[in-house]
Every structure is written in C-alpha cells, then in structure tokens.
Amino acid sequence: MARMKRKQVYIEVEQDRRLREVARRRKGTESELIREGIDRVLASPPLPTLDRKAWREELKFIDDLTRMGPVSGKRTWTRDDLYHERLSRRH
C-alpha cells in the first residue's frame, strides 16, 4: 500500500449517509471512495482563473453604456420580423 497521510475533513450529514451506502454496495471503504474522488478532481483540467481587472473594465464599459441612455432613432424591425426572417433562412 502507498504511504498515506492522515487528513480530517468535515462533510454534510447527507454526504456521510450516501458515502457509507456506496462503500457498502461496492464492498469497499469510505476512505477509498474519498481518495477516488480526490483523484478525479486532481485529474480534471484546472478551472480558468478569474481576471478581476478584466471584469472591472467590462463592468465599467457596461455602466458607461447604460449612462448614455437609449440610442436615438427608432428601430425599423420588430421581433416578429426577425423570427420570420430566421425561419425563412432554415428552409
């Protein structure tokens, strides 16, 4: 067996119940399931990091557009026009 390091974790009551049930059905241990879960998380691609500066810039851009108010002039189309145009492209 590989060298093990002891960790103490807190899980929800429902997680505990389900973990015990799955371990019993598989005829294994809860620890094996936890290690399997850790391996799955570590094998999955990392989540992209949040670029907070880019988000702040985007929110500022949106706020600036909102402050400008509505665009002058009227639109020349209706929602129904777009719907019918889209349908006609499919056929």
Image: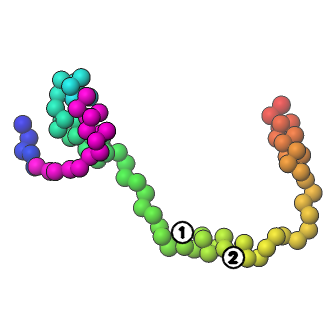
Q: Secondary structure at mark 2?
A: helix
Q: Residue at x 28, y 41 (%)?
A: 13
Q: Amino acid at mark 2?
A: Asp
* Boundaries of the magenta span: 6-21
Left/right of residue 6 with respect to residue 75 in the rendered view: left
Query: In the image, residue 28 lies at what x, y percent?
Result: 17, 28
Q: Is residue 14 visible?
A: yes
Circle on res. 55? 1
Per the image, is 56 magenta?
A: no
Q: Which residue is mark 2?
A: 64
Give the quadrant of residue 71: bottom right
Observer-nearest of 65 and 89: 65
Q: Residue at x 6, y 44 (%)?
A: 3
Q: Residue at x 83, y 31 (%)?
A: 91
Circle on res. 44? none
Give the quadrant of residue 62: bottom right
Query: In the image, residue 31 lies at what x, y percent?
Result: 17, 38
Separation (CA) of disc 1 from disc 2 = 14 Å
Considering the image in quadrants, where does the N terminus appear?
top left
Per the image, is 18 magenta?
A: yes
Q: Residue at x 83, y 36 (%)?
A: 87
